[in-house]
Image (spheres, rainbow, N blue to C red):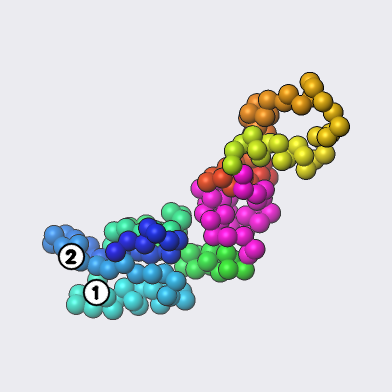
Amino acid sequence: MSNSNDNTPAIYVGTYAKYNNGSLFGKWLDLTEYSDCAEFYEACAELHKGESDPEFMFQDWENIPDQYISESGISQEYWDYLETIEGSYLDAEVFEAAADLDISVDMVEELYQGEYNSDSDFAYDMAEQLGYLDKDVSWPYTCIDWDYAARELMYDYGESSGHYFRTSY
């Protein structure tokens, strides 16, 4: 069972021994059910208690940033990451977008610029926030090429999934 319909972080946990013997036996574990890494690994051990010393194999995962997980393990830092998200005014989606841009979790709130439909929408809003748009001015000043302005602006900013961040820090 996959969790693709929501944003629940989950891992399909099997073992290398079962896999090497042709079995994909395992189970999807919902990480929101565990308070820390140790508790999660206890659940993995319980799932595979038929093996004397199971070597866990994470065959698939969803909604977990790649920097915290691999086929053979998950980091305690992932639970620290979740705690940071819970204490933030920003959604998990913003933190995931920041991770795509290699922005550390502790810098997300400082660098986040907002969500926009396009680079040109971002450039227009930035110009407006900086007071560079005069509503009383008409042609030719209203004929700005916002796509070009966005390309120039994006040297100092990054975008992932519609979320924009300052990247020159």
In the foreground, 55 or 112: 112
In the image, farthest residue toward the right: 136
Position of residue 86 measured from the top left corner of the image (x, y, whole percent): 58, 68
Q: Would residue 100 be visible to someone looking at this image?
A: yes
Dividing the picture into quarters, in which one does residue 59 lie?
bottom left
When the figure is inspected, residue 21 is found, relative to residue 166, above or below; the finding is: below
Screen quadrant of the C terminus: top right
Position of residue 67 measured from the top left corner of the image (x, y, whole percent): 46, 55
- Mark 1 surroundings within 10 Å by alpha-carbon count, few (fewer than 14), some (14 through 19), many (20 or more): many
Give residue 138's mark: none
In the image, farthest residue toward the left: 21
Q: Secondary structure at mark 1?
A: loop
Q: CA distance from mark 1 to mark 2?
A: 10 Å
Q: Secondary structure at mark 2?
A: helix
Q: Is residue 91 magenta?
A: yes
Screen quadrant of the N terminus: bottom left
Check contact, mark 1 vs mark 2: CB within 8 A.
Answer: yes
- Amino acid marked by disc 1: His
Dividing the picture into quarters, in which one does residue 37 lie?
bottom left
Magenta extent: 88-116
Tell me which residue sits at (66%, 40%) in the image.
122
Position of residue 104 measured from the top left corner of the image (x, y, whole percent): 58, 54
- Amino acid marked by disc 2: Lys
Tell me which residue sits at (58%, 66%) in the image.
84
When the figure is inspected, residue 67 is found, relative to residue 46, above or below; the finding is: above
Mark 1 vs 2, N-terminal side:
2
- Mark 2 surroundings within 10 Å by alpha-carbon count, few (fewer than 14), some (14 through 19), many (20 or more): some
Tell me which residue sits at (62%, 48%) in the image.
115
User: Which residue does the numbered mark 1 point to in the structure image?
Assistant: 48
User: Which residue does the numbered mark 2 point to in the structure image?
Assistant: 18
Tell me which residue sits at (32%, 61%) in the image.
2
